[in-house]
Structures are given as structure tokens and as C-alpha cells.
Amino acid sequence: MHRALVAAGVVVLVAASLTSPTSAASAVDAKPVPTGAGPTGAVPGGFATWSELIEVQTRLNAAADKVEAAKNTGFAGIVAAPENRELRVYWKGDAGTSVRSLVADLNRDVPVRLLPARFSEAELASAARGLTSVPNVVNAIPKVDGSGIQLTVSGGDSARAGAARAVRDSTVPVTVVAGEKPVATYNRQADVPLYVGGSRFRSPIGECTTGFAIFLGSNSAMLTAGHCGENGQSAYTGAGVWLGSIHSKNTCQDTMIISAYSAGRIYTGDPYSGNRVAVGGAASNRVGNWITTSGATSGERNSVQVTATGLLTTVDGIPCGMVGPLIQARHTGGQCAVAPGDSGGPVIAYRTDGKVNALGTITAGSDPVPDSACPGTIHTPGYNYVYYAPIPITVRGTNLIFA
């Protein structure tokens, strides 16, 4: 057996220490929805009140819906800004008798202007797709007036992007501007309800990662690693928001449950990613299988292969003679499969339908690798080997939540 399985050779992955179950129905019914007070602050566009602006905007949007329902291949875009006091409709070529007649009818209630466009909406959409190969592209925005594409690139090298072949060969004018990639308002480090696996949480013991959403009766909860907390303690998200109470700890299997309002998805991508994938089922672990780890510290780690099943091993930080049975796997490229703070995180296998199967929850790692072999990791060192508790054991008496 691999040399890392000797006593104290496997390292528990909690980060440095830091000094009630809810059913879906009750969570919805128990929260009254107050009547909104409406927008506050200065009213734009010279309107006297927000109510006046909203009334104009509502009429413009109603007219816009009718125009879009009648659009043909020449349609380019619509601007329904209340401060314009009119609906501006952009069209390439002749809009046709029916559209012109509709515009005339709409003008009885809402000012509508039919303006010429150089390119149609369909032409700009096609051109935008052709610009996705530009280096450091963030987005490609079809201009609403049909005049071309605005291409946003990151990294400060807009000149390089402007010289890219895709830009030079574009059939429509392209304006290149500098910008940064949009950031999700929730991610692995600061999850929000419904909570999903692969996100940061904290307990009095330290930082760990959520695993898989489960049902306990009619209540949802979150499965994670047992060494990440003690029964009765509270868990909090990476942003410090209360996540739930810890219970059902099994020390030697290294599992526990958090009473978190959860959904059957997990985070994928880097440690700050907001991307998620649906959990479609659970599967057994087989030596030779290729699997993926998804921790809040190291993010999604692929090229990981199962090397052993049914392990019983000693683990630093877990007060149990032998922990397990566990699964052992390693990153075949010599990079990290796991890092401190990934404990409890999901181990998954991708499926052909775009979902993933749940395989287990991360317990520990061994064989540290250089920081350069663990790009993007928040805490170091990273470990080449990962050890995890298999799902068929960890969810006995519970049900995974699938999406």
C-alpha cells in the first residue's frame, strides 16, 4: 500500500482554527412578503415622481412587446428609455407594410420612431458568436442601434484584441474596450440559499467545504466531513451568515450533517466560481475511474484517478484508531487533488447528460506538492493524493437531493 498510509501520514484538511432544519414548505409559508415602498432617490429624466416614470416606462414596454411580436429579418433593436419620451425602433431596410401600420397605430398612445439600422439583430448575433475566439474576451455586445459590436476584453491589451484575426475578419464594425469579467454575487466563498455543495463554511474548529444536499425526512440538510465540527455547534458561510446546526457526527467514518436549507447542486470551477452543476445520482467508486474533486480552497480538480478502495487508515487530527473505509485517488499530472479547507467537499464523476454523480466527501490529503502545482489554491500546501468517504456509506439512512 502507498507509503502515505502509515500512521500520521495522511493529513486532515481543516484550515487554521477560527476563534434548525427547515422544510421547503415552511420556509416559504413562514415569510410574509411586505408591500414594497417603490424606488427612492432622485428621479431621472426630469420626471416629477417615480410613479410618473414607471407609468411611462410601462406604456413604452407594452408597445415594444407588440413591435417585437411583429418583427421580421430586418429588425435590429429597441430602446425603451422613459427619459426619451418615445420608443425608438431600429430596422435594417424596409420594415414592411404591416410593421409600418403597427407603428402608426401605436403612435396614437405612445410616440414611436422607426429608425434606420446598418445591420439586423440576427446579423449582429452571428458576428458576436464569431468573436468569442478573441484573446481575453469578456463579452460581445450587439449595439442596439444595429451599428456593430462592442467587444470587451480583460487584461488591458485592447490593442492586441483589436488586431485579432476574428476582429479583422468580422463582417460588422467592432469597437474594442477594456473591462473585467463579471463576478457572480454568490460563489464558493459566500454561498446563499439554497445552499449547494463545494462552498466555504466555518465552524469553531475551522474552515471546510460543504458536500452534498440530502433529505432528512422532509427537511433538507448538507452532508460534509465529520472532523469539521462537533454536534451542537453552529456552521456559518464564508461570508459569516448562519448556515445551520451540526449534528449526526460519525468520527470514524468522518461524516456529519449541517441543518442547512440545501439544493442538489455543487459548485464547479475555480475557488471564486459561481458556476454550478446538478447532481443527478450517486455511484460506486472503482479503481481506475477518473473522478473530480470540488473544494472551496482548490476549486475543481480534474485528472484525478482512483487508486484504491476500502482503505482503513490513520489520519492526523481525527481521534479514531482507523478512519474509513475510504477511497484513495491521485492527480495523475502531479498537481494537487486537494488542499487545506477542502475537507467535506464533493467528489464527483461527470455524466453524459451534463449532470454529475455523487461519489463521496473529502477527508484528507497526502504527498504535498509545490505551490506551482496547485494553481489558484487559496491555502497551501496542496496534496497529490486525496482520501474521501464514499457516498454509499455516508448517506445510509438519508437520501441525496437530485436536481
Image (spheres, grey):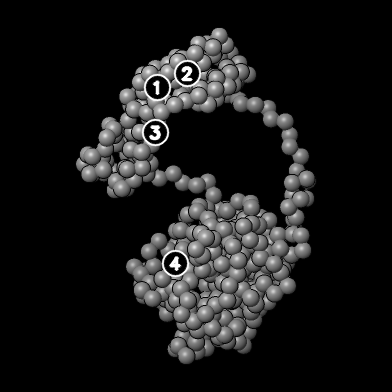
- Residue pointed to by mark 4: 301
Q: Earlier in the sequence, mark 1 or mark 4?
A: 1
Alpha carbons under labels 1 and 4: distance apart: 48 Å
**Foreground pick, 33 / 286:** 286
Q: Which residue is mark 3?
A: 122
Of 353 and 320, nearer the camera is: 353
Instruction: Identify the residue under disc 2.
Output: 99
User: Hey, which residue is sitting farthest front in the picture?
Assistant: 97
Ranked by sequence position, the earlier of labels 2 and 1 is: 1
- Please say if the residues under marks 2 and 1 sit with CB atoms less than 8 Å apart: yes
Q: Which residue is drawn at the image coordinates 51% and 65% (left, top)?
A: 351
Q: Amino acid at mark 1?
A: Trp
Going from the N terminus, do you reach mark 3 or mark 2 first? 2
Residue at 49% in and 63% down: 352
Q: Is the residue marked by circle 4 packed among few (<14), some (14-19), or many (20+) residues within 10 Å? A: many
Give coordinates of residue 314: x percent, y percent: 56, 85
Mark pair 4, 2: CA separation: 54 Å
Report how many numbered discs are placed on residues in the image: 4
Q: CA distance from mark 3 to mark 1?
A: 11 Å
Q: Dot 4: what SS?
A: strand
Please indicate whether residue 298 sits to the left or right of residue 47 in the image. Answer: left
Q: What residue is shown with label 1?
A: 91
Near mark 3 (Cα within 10 A), the count class, few <14, some 14-19 or many ≥20, is some
Q: Are marks 3 and 1 in contact (CB under 8 Å)?
A: no
Residues at badges 1 and 4 in contact (C-beta under 8 Å)? no
Q: Secondary structure at mark 1?
A: strand
